[in-house]
Image (spheres, rainbow, N blue to C red):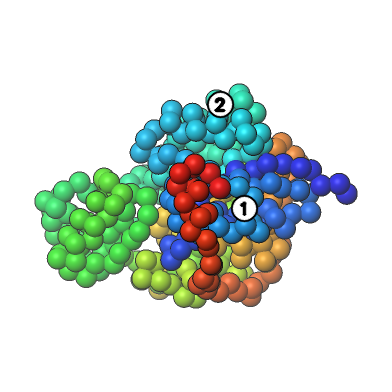
Amino acid sequence: MDQRKVTVAVTGLNNIDSPGPGIPVIRGIRESKVFNVRIIGLAYEHLEPGIYMRDLVDKTYMIPYPSEGKDALFKRLLEIHAKEKLDVIIPNFDAELFSFIKLEKKLDGVGIKTYLPSIEQFEERNKSNLSAYGEKYGVHVPAGTEVYSTSDLNNILRSMNYPVMIKGKYYDAYAANSFEQAVNYFIRLSAKWGFPVIVQEFIRGTEVNVVALGDGKGNLIAAVPMRKQYITEKGKAWGGITIEDPSLLELAGKIIFQTKWRGGIELELIRSTDHRLYLIEINPRIPAWVYLAVGAGQNIPEALLMLTLGMEVNPFTRYDVGKMFVRYSYDMIVDLELFSRLTTTGEL
């Protein structure tokens, strides 16, 4: 079968201790039997490791930070498109998704496809809206509330038991065992990600995650659950294993069906000591551990690309249980000349 040639731009090349999903997404696409791909990296920082992974990324362009707004982003994407004739963009960061969703029609108008949730879907699963989300869709969620000041934090913590979870607007979460710790985390997270900071009930149990893919019509195209085996100080899975748990797949199918979710999604859950499943977070994109799903038999990045291009995709019906992933650090040697070229021209 002849492979279809496509040019795909991918963000999230920061393969560091809190890795972006870009590199595992690219690895899945590179292993596709359907596509012959040219990968264009879209980077925010000059030292994102994926920029220099020449076997995975064909060319990289710097793009403006999400804080600069969608107009600056669209202008830059048009410049890149003029050179590369992009077919598809796969954004992989929560903070950039709002702009990409808002630009979806304009991008489609110049021939660039995306496959993203609607603004309504994106906003209703925000951490700050999780309680209402759980009530609307009949899912157990920890009690939580938004915090905008230390006085807010003090008032809320009076009615909660320690430990409590202090969560950033987009990323990062810490378990606080005292008011002093909670204030420290609040200041750190608000400075990094802005407001609100979310204070959430701490649920004791086992952390489990599901990566899933929805077609926007309520159909679950893919889903793989895993249990975290090794967790970093930042709460990131550095090792995990696929598990057999029909209740996780049932929950993923229920959420995809009820919300008509379009695109990749990650459900972060806790199986409590009394065996209840609590939904603690919904990430509106493919997670950084997605290559485990590829290794277990569900190439979710390839399926996402097929959906984006309007191709028919049959839902996956199985995956391998007991497949593990283990992350590792790897030193690349890069010439300073490459870094200098990127900083002066904005492309490499």
Dot 1: few (<14), some (14–19), or many (≥20) neighbours within 10 Å? many
Tell me the residue at 31%/56% (across/down). 167
Number of numbered discs overlaid on the protein picture: 2
* Identity, as a three-letter code, of the amino acid under mark 1: Val
Q: Position of residue 246 (x, y in %)?
A: 60, 64
Q: CA distance from mark 1 to mark 2?
A: 26 Å
Q: Nearer the viewer, residue 208 or 323?
A: 323
Side of 266 where 243 appears, left or right: right
Side of 121 where 135 appears, left or right: left
> Does 68 appear above or below 34?
above
Residue reaching furthest to the right: 1
Residue 198 visible, this orientation: no
Image mark for residue 105: 2
Dot 2: few (<14), some (14–19), or many (≥20) neighbours within 10 Å? some
Q: Position of residue 261 (x, y in %)?
A: 55, 42
Tell me the residue at 57%/64% (across/down). 225
Q: Nearer the viewer, residue 149 or 139?
A: 149
Residue 208 visible, this orientation: yes
Identify residue for label 1.
57
Tell me the residue at 55%/57% (across/down). 52
Q: Nearer the viewer, residue 181 or 11?
A: 11
- When asked about the image quadrant of residue 78, the answer is top right
Q: Secondary structure at mark 1?
A: loop
Q: Earlier in the sequence, mark 1 or mark 2?
A: 1
Residue reaching furthest to the front: 337
Q: Nearer the viewer, residue 323 or 95?
A: 95
